[in-house]
Amino acid sequence: MDRGLFSTSYTYETYPGPVGVPRNVVVQGGREAVLTLDTAIRIKKHQQPMTGFDLIARGEDTPLLQVRRRRDNDYPLGETFPVPCGIYTLGVHLEDMEEPSPVGEGIEIQKGRLLEFDTGL
């Protein structure tokens, strides 16, 4: 592998684009580089018929993460999703609603922590 500064991303089968995490990984020539994906969010399961959620980083308009359930079940809504640490807004998509419903602003996801978020629905 060449040395330099790299960004990585991953994709998930039920959302449209890659999620960039982590950013600015330094790789030195002739050495091994290890990525640790230890910062993440998980939405607590609830009774409301949620069809998905969007996680938007502060100062951005486009969601960093867009998760949608499959038609036949709730997968992957309750899964753990690695994301960069930062401040976010969370909007949930509910059945029969065209726009996401905001359920959290100023949500802080700390480096090296899993945030399990309760939407209150």
Image: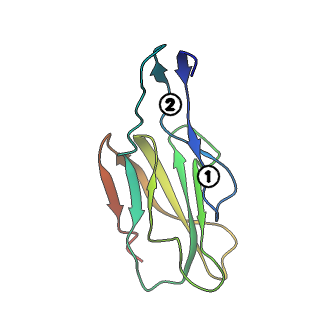
Image quarter where the N terminus lies is top right
Q: Which residue is mark 2?
A: 23
Where is residue 101? Give x, y as percent: 55, 67
Residue type beneath disc 2: Arg
Q: Earlier in the sequence, mark 1 or mark 2?
A: 1
Where is residue 33? Give x, y as percent: 42, 27
Q: Residues within 10 Å of mark 1 (few under 14, many from 20)?
A: few
Label 2: element kind = loop
Residue type beneath disc 1: Thr
Q: Is residue 53 above or below residue 55?
A: below
Residue 21 falls left or right of residue 106:
right
Image quarter where the C terminus lies is bottom left
User: Which one is in front, 37 or 98?
Assistant: 37
Where is residue 39? Give x, y as percent: 37, 46
Q: Is residue 116 above or below residue 94?
A: above
Residue 110 falls left or right of residue 46:
left
Residue 11: which disc? 1
Picture mark count: 2
Q: Residue at x 45, y 41 (%)?
A: 84
Q: CA distance from mark 1 to mark 2?
A: 15 Å
User: Which one is in front, 8 or 57?
Assistant: 8
Q: Is residue 1 above or below residue 23?
A: above
User: Which one is in front, 120 or 2?
Assistant: 2
